[in-house]
Image (cartoon, grey):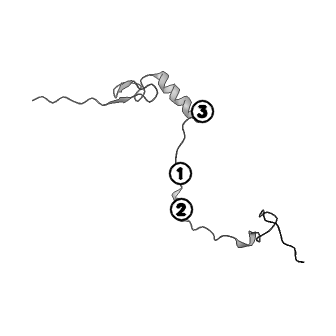
Amino acid sequence: MSRRKRVRSLRCPTCKKLVLRSDPEFPFCSERCRLIDLGKWASDAYVVSTPVFDPDELEQPSSPPDHKSEKPEGGADSGRPTRKPH
């Protein structure tokens, strides 16, 4: 029984044509598709969907909140009217 060797391939990310791993422009089908993809990166068309966290930042304990900078309730910035004593 002869075993057939499986040829690895995938689709060009730009035009979705079938591309073989042995092609010179792999994973793209042509230089044109490679340049189109590069242009998308350069113009920020691609974005990372989740925020990237620095592992060193997560290990450092955060400083406790500064309670002195909080404004008292009913201040000018609270949106509530201030009461005046009679």
Describe residue 79's horizontal placement relative to residue 64 as left or right: right
Which residue is painted at 44% across and 30% down in the image? Answer: 13
Q: Is residue 34 above or below residue 67?
A: above
User: How many residues crowd around disc 1 within 10 Å: few (fewer than 14), some, or many (20 or more)?
Assistant: few
- Residue at the spot 83% in from the left edge and 69% down from the top edge: 82
Q: Where is residue 6 in the image (x, y as percent from the top left)?
A: 24, 30
Alpha-carbon span between mark 3 and mark 1: 20 Å
Closer to the camera, 7 or 49? 49
Write the residue at 56% across / 60% down: 57
Q: Residue furthest right?
A: 86
Q: In this view, does 61 lie above or below 31?
A: below
Q: Residue 26 carries which label?
A: none
Q: What residue type is labelled 2?
A: Leu
Q: Residue at x 74, y 72 (%)?
A: 68
Examine the image and state in which quarter residue 46 appears: top right
Residue carrying label 3: 43
Helix, strand or loop status at disc 1: loop
Instruction: Decide which of tag 3 and tag 2 comes sooner along the chain.
Output: 3
Specify the farthest residue to the bottom. 86
Q: In which quarter of the image is the N terminus?
A: top left
Residue type for callout 3? Ser
Q: How crowded is mark 2: few (under 14 residues within 10 Å), some or many (20 or more)?
A: few
Q: Gap in Å between the C-alphas at discs 3 and 2?
A: 31 Å
Q: Do the residues labelled 3 and 2 touch (CB within 8 Å)?
A: no
Would you place residue 64 above or below residue 32 in this image?
below
Q: Is mark 2 on a helix, strand or loop?
A: helix
Quadrant in which residue 29 is drawn? top left
Q: Mark 1 points at which residue?
A: 52
Q: Are marks 2 and 1 in contact (CB under 8 Å)?
A: no
Say which residue label 2 marks.
Answer: 58
Q: How many numbered marks have been drawn onto this rendered protein structure?
A: 3
